[in-house]
Image (cartoon, helix red, strand yellow):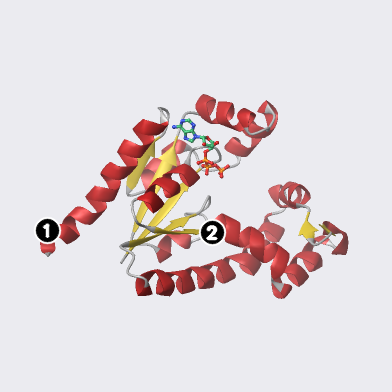
Amino acid sequence: MKLIGVTGGIGSGKTTVCDILRSLGCAVFNADLEAKRLQETDADVIAGIKNLFGDGIYQSGVPDRKKIASIVFSDSKKLDALNRLIHPKVFALFEAAKAQAAASGKPALVKEAAILFESGGARQVDETIAVIADKAVRVKRLLERGLSEAEAEQRIAAQLSNDDLIKRADYVICNNGTLDDLKRDTAKIFHQLFEPLLKKS
Ligand code: ATP
């Protein structure tokens, strides 16, 4: 079974790419969703977050993510501590998902992660795909999702640039076009990933 990491900045289209890969038969593990879920359900993570940011950071069992983001933005020690709390648990969940996907005969397990390279999560996969798109295209998509232009630009600026992603990923999908373009480009990479295996057998 192949392990494929899919990453990209906010609004680039990585979730859409993972949906397409799912429709092609892959299992998908969403590391960002799992990390979010752990912050609301895992006792160690909840205690660790309260320890770092104070008990008041939780309201009705949900952490104030905006506040946490604004604190760690300018406090790298807290960011490291937060990552140390969450990433090992997400990695362990991915290992469990791997066993499950292999047992159900899936050809590939896709790991979707916004910070695949920064978190070290890329080491858990065989191949990486970066989904990129021009800033103006991403801002437009994010405005449609209810973010303000300033918020969208700030989040884009805080993430790896398209150039960095291109340097680090094995495959790059440029998602400036239509959904049909994205489906075609994703399917092309999917087939490229499996070609060497097909040739061997
Ligand atoms: P996030 O990091 O915020 O989760 P993402 O990289 O996962 O973002 P998506 O959620 O896949 O991005 O896409 C962002 C929005 O843009 C979605 O509403 C999606 O339907 C839309 N979108 C993605 N690709 C295209 C495209 N090629 N054409 C039109 N809309 C698109």
Seen at 51% across and 26% down, the residue is: 137
The residue tagged with tag 2: helix, strand or loop?
helix
Task: Look at the image and tell me whether residue 148 can be seen.
Answer: yes
- Calculate the distance from the C-alpha at mark 1 to the C-alpha at mark 2: 32 Å
Q: Nearer the viewer, residue 53 or 190?
A: 190
Q: Residue furthest right?
A: 56
Q: Nearer the viewer, residue 163 or 25?
A: 25
Instruction: Classify residue 4 as left or right of residue 69.
Output: left
Name the residue that disc number 2 marks: 31
Mark count: 2
Q: Position of residue 198 (x, y in %)?
A: 16, 59
Q: Is residue 155 above or below residue 201?
A: above
Q: Nearer the viewer, residue 176 or 158?
A: 176
Name the residue that disc number 1 marks: 199
Task: Look at the image and tell me whether residue 81 can be seen.
Answer: no
Seen at 12% across and 63% down, the residue is: 200
